[in-house]
Amino acid sequence: MVVALLSAAMSRKSWRSYKKERLLKHDRERITAYIQQDFQTPFGAKPRFTLIDCEPNDKLGTYGFISDAQHFIAGAVKKAPMCIEDYGFALEKIILIATTFGLGTCWLAAFDKQGFAERIRLMSDEVLPAVTPIGYKAEQGRKDQLIHWAAGSDNRKMWSELFFDTYFNTPLEPENAGDYMSAFTMVQFAPSGSNAQPWRLILDEDTVHFYHDGKKEYNQVRQLDMGIAFSHFQSAMDLFHIKGEWSIKDPDRTSGKMSYVATWTRTESD
């Protein structure tokens, strides 16, 4: 399963146009089973997810970005420090598993939240950070291609921009990444809002520090992005049976506008 997720992470594309077809029974059952699991998130939040069937009178607005979706996955998480990152971590796992099933998805952090909140019965102590359509892909139209192009979705920053060796003044060379090369490559290919790739990672022996690049405010979208990066990193570590722990222990290596977010520390290998 982990190998399939890694392959999906490298090949997946956001999909905005869907066939007007309901999920077949076997697809519905395996997606429902997957989203109902107890996700083990880095900082202990427990997001809950719901598969929504679109109805004719639904007010599930996506500001015109999504066409003809018959289903969405929406979720909620209780308000707490790092809850948005944990939500992003879990929803990315759902999106990747859906990709292995051959289904289309698309991260949406900008949408009409009232309609979705009503459908999932959002509580006052919860937040609904993002949703995704899910279903069978239709041919991408001109509008889809323009959105994909405008976001620069096929472009990825170089290693030297994203990953560093002990301090920010030393870019990490791939050949020096050791057991972490696959995990860092997974992070390099992680999706993010407007393809900003706002994460910066420092490798210090068997510890990895995650930073926000500081080019924009560390808002909810950037928090989701960081959770997605955590998810890609963790999936690669799981593939190689390398265990570690997440924590918040600022090593005080901030450079410029960058801000510290979290740390992963290796504990053992199977």
Image: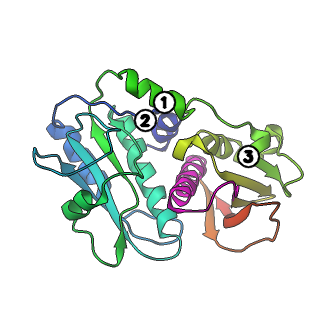
Dot 3 and dot 1 residues touching (CB under 8 Å): no
Mark 2 or mark 1, earlier in chain? 2
Q: Is residue 37 visible?
A: no
Residue at the (70%, 60%) spot, across then down = 211
Which percent across, then down, holds residue 29?
A: 20, 46
Kindly identify which residue carries mark 1. 148
Q: Where are the magenta residues, as a range? A: 212-240
Q: Main secondary structure of the magenta part?
A: helix
Tell us which disc is closer to us: 3 or 1.
1
Q: Is residue 223 magenta?
A: yes
Q: Nearer the viewer, residue 161 or 8?
A: 161
Kindly identify which residue carries mark 2. 14
Kindly identify which residue carries mark 3. 162
> Which image quarter is the C terminus in?
bottom right
Check disc 2 and report its element: helix, strand or loop.
loop
Q: Amino acid at mark 1?
A: His
Instruction: Tell me the crowding category of disc 3: few under 14, some 14 to 19, or many 20 or more residues within 10 angstroms, Cα based.
Output: many
Q: Amino acid at mark 3?
A: Leu
Mark 3 or mark 2, earlier in chain? 2
Q: Amino acid at mark 2?
A: Ser
Quadrant assignment, res 206: bottom right
Residue at the (61%, 47%) spot, across then down = 240
